[in-house]
Structure formats: C-alpha cells, structure tokens
C-alpha cells in the first residue's frame, strides 16, 4: 500500500519470537520503520483515533483496538490507572533500532457520567498505529498474547485496506443558524449563574451550549481534520471514530504534557475575538483581552492548576503574567505551568488531580459541578473532557477537548462554552460561544471546498 512493502513473514516471525520470550504477557506489539506515513481515510476504518501536533511535527493515526477498557463513575480515573499499570506490566514490544515506544489512546467525558455516544472514559491500544515525528515514520501492530497465530494475517488485510477512499462532496449549510429558544435558555442560565456568583456561593461557572448544522450530503471527516490542522497549527487536532460517528476538534489547551519527569499544564482562560468571527448578527461585542473580567477568570484557573500540581509535584513554576495566545479570530490568556512530578506519580494520577480545571468547570470545583448538574448542564461526547495518549515509557499528552464537534452522516453538532465570573454579562458570554463556534464552522467550510476539488 502506498508503495510501502512489508515483509509479513518477517513480522510473523518477530511476533512468534516475542511470544516465546515474553510469557506470560497480555499484549504484544511489533514496530516497523516506514519511509513515510501513508494517507489513511480514517472514517472508513471502523474504530479510529487521530492526533496531530503540527507545531511538534507529530502525527498519530490508530485503527482498531487490540486492548480496551471503558469505565464511568467517580472512580473512573482510578480504574484507568489500574488498567494502564497492569497493561504496562504485561506489555511486550519488539522494535528495530531507535523507535518510540508503543502507546495507548485515552479519552474521557467532562463529568463522571455521560459522554454518549462515546464511552464515559476509555483507554485503548490500537491494533495498528501509524506514527510520524520530526520526519520519521513507524507502524506499530498490536494484538492480544492469545492471538499470535491469527494476528499477522489480519494485520496484512488491514494494511492492504488502507487505500484512501474517494472523497464525497461535504458542503454543509453554513448560513447563520439561529436557535432562539436555546439562546434564551443559555441567557437564563447565565443570569442564574451570575446570581449564584454574586451570592458568594461560587467564584466562576462555565456554561456550555451546542448548535446543529446539516449538510446536503454525508460529511467527509478527513478533509475537515486536514483543515483544522492547517488552520490551527499550534493546537492539538484530534479525532476519534466509533460506530460511524466522529468526534473531532482542535484544542488550544493542554491538560497535561508529561515528558519524563517534566510536567506542563496550560492555564487557559479569558477570551477576545474579531467581530467577523460571529455568524449571528446583533450579538454583543467582545471585551478587551486585558479587561478585568478576563484577568480574574484567568487567575482562577492559574491558581487552581498550581495548587493541583503542588500536591503531586515539586518545583511548580507559574509565570508571573499571562501571555496572549493568538488563534486566528480568537485570542486567549495563557500561562504554561511547569513542574517536576514525583517518581511515584503517573500521568493518570495527575489527570485525576487536574480535571476539571476552572477553565471548563468553575471554582470551587465541587460546588460548581453540583450547580451545573442541577441546572441541566449537558455536554456531548467528550467535550470539555480530555483526549490524548499515554506511551509505554510513561510519557503522555492530553488535550482538553475544546473547539470541537460530533459528526454523524449529514449532521454536525458543535460545542462551545464561556466562563462566568462576578460582573459577567450573559449576552456577552453568548457572543463568546458564537465566536468559538467559528473554529469548527471554518473547518467545515474548508473541508467542503477540499472535497469538491478532489472530486473534480
């Protein structure tokens, strides 16, 4: 496929040798170098995962599942931590030369319940992982230790099926879509949020909403992902496919990056935007990024991130002042908090401590989660949860699932939210959500142009 022959007999022999020397084991993986990363039409491949960091020259594409665990509830991160620890203890991998260790994919919803149509929280190892970093490419094939005899033939069939399918015209109706009842409901919840904050019960609340767009034909996911990566090169472009649905987006916010002992977390809050980012006319104008409301909202997040890391890390360093993160029509205040993790602390330990930050929930955390649950907060798929990867060496990168949407057939449901603090204007926060919808709207439009050009 794509001019990249693979010695399948050699792959089978590597797997057999690995099985002979690695008993007992739960999972076996074989990694091969590639001359380049092949193009893959992921929406046609059943369960799939995509991760792109153009700013770090990194691309991942996972297909199928060789190992998976799903869970939900208050102890979901503890369950994933135990499952991942058990997997690492029983995961054997053969690799030639200096290649990166195999990895597992991770995704979870905002709250301990919900997340449909995706599982609330999931950890899985793709059967095939295509990986590119700094110009080098690899393919990792994985299977259960009990599946050694059948796996090579299945891997060969999977590899041969990867030829990109013809794209279809995916022109969505991108004219401004107004949802007056939903907008009024958001404004009413916003006024209730301001009252709760003014009473002193809460300091910050993040309210969310969704809109639905419909295309004339089934939406082609691959060109939309390409558009997100091209338009937001300093973000994490992500996608996960399950049962014909695709949850995709481009997140500017890193929940956790773990490289050895070094921890990086983004404290991201405070938003301004260009007026032309809003499709709905007559909405409120943005505040200046340096406005008091934006500074206070950002400070809540930075303090909470630092406190969460201090419980499990040392040398926590918070920049004295935020920087401006420019993202096309949007800009945010960001502090990148760094720390050194303790040796006994894992990526999932840190995620359990960090999530949800006030950037997506509010503060104080327990009170805001209770308020949101009692005021009908509904967040589809993994919106404002997390998505990313954990490798077999303990490294990880997980993004907060923002600027995203759920695609199914001809329909796209887009998600956005805004933070309320004392003095917030609900109409202005509604306008902020409209500006945030512009990220996915632009990608849908660019994806439609791309598919028409391919068809021509």
Image (cartoon, rainbow, N blue to C red):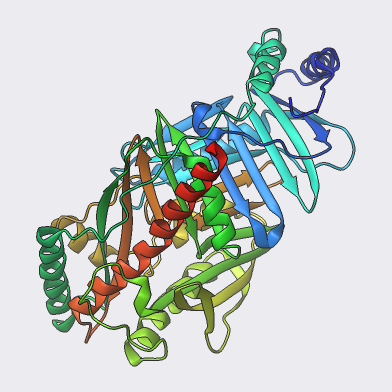
Q: Is residue 300 left or right of residue 447?
A: left
Q: Image point 64% across, 61% down: which residue?
A: 342
Nearest the camera: 337 or 177?
177
Q: Image point 45% across, 47% down: which residue?
A: 448
Nearest the camera: 435 or 92?
435
Q: Image point 59% across, 58% down: which residue?
A: 230
Residue 150 place in picture, x, y as percent:
67, 8
Residue 96 place in picture, x, y as percent:
88, 33
From where the camera sits, is residue 50 visible?
yes
Q: Image point 57% across, 81% down: which residue?
A: 318
Q: Examine the rendered structure and indicate whether residue 20 appears above or below residue 355.
A: above
Quarter of the N terminus within the rendering: top right
Residue 313 place in picture, x, y as percent:
60, 67
Quarter of the C terminus within the rendering: top right
The count of marks equals: 0
Q: Quadrant of residue 339?
A: bottom right
């Amino acid at each position: 496929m794509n001019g990249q022959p693979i010695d399948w007999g050699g792959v089978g022999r590597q797997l057999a040798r690995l099985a002979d020397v690695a008993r007992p084991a739960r999972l076996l993986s074989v990694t091969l170098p590639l001359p380049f990363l092949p193009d893959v039409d992921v929406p046609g491949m059943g369960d799939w995962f995509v991760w792109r960091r153009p700013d770090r020259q990194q691309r991942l594409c996972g297909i199928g599942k060789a190992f998976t665990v799903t869970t939900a509830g208050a102890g979901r991160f503890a369950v994933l931590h135990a499952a991942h620890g058990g997997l690492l203890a029983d995961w054997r991998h053969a690799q030639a030369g200096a290649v990166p260790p195999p990895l597992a994919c991770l995704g979870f919803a905002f709250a301990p319940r919900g997340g449909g149509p995706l599982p609330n929280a999931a950890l899985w190892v793709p059967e095939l992982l295509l990986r590119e970093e700094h110009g080098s490419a690899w393919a990792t094939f994985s299977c259960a230790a009990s599946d050694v005899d059948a796996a090579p033939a299945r891997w060969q069939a999977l590899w041969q099926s990867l030829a990109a399918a013809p794209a279809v015209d995916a022109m969505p109706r991108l004219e401004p879509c107004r949802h007056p009842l939903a907008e009024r409901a958001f404004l009413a919840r916003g006024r209730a949020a301001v009252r709760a904050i003014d009473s002193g019960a809460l300091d910050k609340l993040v309210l969310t909403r969704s809109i639905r767009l419909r295309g004339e034909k089934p939406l082609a996911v691959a060109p939309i992902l390409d558009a997100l990566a091209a338009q937001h090169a300093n973000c994490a472009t992500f996608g996960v496919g399950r049962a014909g649905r695709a949850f995709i987006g481009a997140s500017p916010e890193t929940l956790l990056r773990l490289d050895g002992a070094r921890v990086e977390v983004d404290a991201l809050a405070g938003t301004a935007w260009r007026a032309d980012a809003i499709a709905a006319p007559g909405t409120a104008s943005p505040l200046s990024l340096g406005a008091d409301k934006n500074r206070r909202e950002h400070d809540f997040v930075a303090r909470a991130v630092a406190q969460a890391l201090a419980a499990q890390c040392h040398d926590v360093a918070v920049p004295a002042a935020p920087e401006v993160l420019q993202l096309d029509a949007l800009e945010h205040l960001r502090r990148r908090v760094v720390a050194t993790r303790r040796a006994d602390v894992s990526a999932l330990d840190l995620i359990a401590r960090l999530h949800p930050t006030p950037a997506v929930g509010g503060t104080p955390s327990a009170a805001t989660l209770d308020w949101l649950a009692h005021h009908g907060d509904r967040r589809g798929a993994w919106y404002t949860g997390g998505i990313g990867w954990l490798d077999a060496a303990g490294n990880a990168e997980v993004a907060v699932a923002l600027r995203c949407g759920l695609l199914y057939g001809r329909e796209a449901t887009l998600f956005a939210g805004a933070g309320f603090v004392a003095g917030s204007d609900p109409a202005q926060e509604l306008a902020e959500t409209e500006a945030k919808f512009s990220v996915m709207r632009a990608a849908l439009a660019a994806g439609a142009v791309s598919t028409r050009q391919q068809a021509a």
